[in-house]
Amino acid sequence: MNAAPPVRLETLLEAVERASDLEDLQRLIGQLRDFHRVDHMVYHWVSATGDQYGCGTYPDIWVRRYLEQDYLRVDPVVQGCYQRFHPVDWKQLDWSGKAARAFQQEAISYGIGHQGYSVPVRGPNGQFALFTVSHDCDDASWEAFIARHRRDLVLIAHTFNQRALEFEPDRAADKVQPLSPREVDGLTLLAMGYSRAQVAQTLSISEHTLRVYIESARFKLGAVNTVHAVARATARGLIVI
């Protein structure tokens, strides 16, 4: 009897795209966690109206504890990622405060793991989502894992977010003019943390020319400023960090 063929990432992502409800997403995020052989994988989404839901593999007892203690106020992962547009390793966040350190130790005691990588994702109308993987291993093993799977994790995050947006009631389709290659390049580098001067130098253009590209992209995206433009472009999959 032949062994069943191994599950491929593309197959799991296609299943996410076909998910009909949150229960489907919960089942699939467990499969993706197993596929990547990490301790936990979590997706949390906040809609434009403030409604929240999520799916993931954290222990129920920790989820209840987190909500009861309102740890959203002190969680450096949430606070740090809300100010970022690019994926972040937890070691890059500020854990220096007493409350943050106590929170970290308690999370580890519940089996969350001391290594983590989170991908912030924005939706087109103010939605904010966070996709996270966490594990308990040494630094070298974690760095190797992230180097190998960084692109996959970003792809998973955006696939989950796109499906979550489809679940949002009364969502109207967004009509966006396509961005030019230079507009995509400029927004991508800004999202990665480059300064305008660094972006201009990387693209071999003047800062004035860069400003023209960014303003054009901002207009096409209906964004109020550059940060908003980066958020909208990222959420719509127009740029991938």
Image (spheres, rainbow, N blue to C red):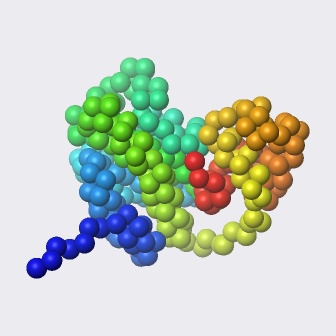
Residue 34 location in percent, x, y? Answer: 26, 57
Location of residue 83 by image quarter? top right
**Which residue in the rendered view is the most extreme toward the left?**
1
Location of residue 56 by image quarter? bottom left
The one of 5 and 81 positioned closer to us in this rendering:
5
The one of 232 and 38 positioned closer to us in this rendering:
38
Residue drawn 75% across the image and 64% down it:
178
Residue 26 location in percent, x, y? Answer: 33, 63
The one of 146 and 64 positioned closer to us in this rendering:
146
Residue 206 location in percent, x, y? Answer: 86, 37
Residue 214 against residue 30 in the figure, above or below: above
Residue drawn 59% across the image and 43% down it:
85
Label count reads 0
Residue 146 as seen in the image, left or right of residue 192: left
Residue 236 visible from this viewpoint: yes
The one of 86 and 94 positioned closer to us in this rendering:
86
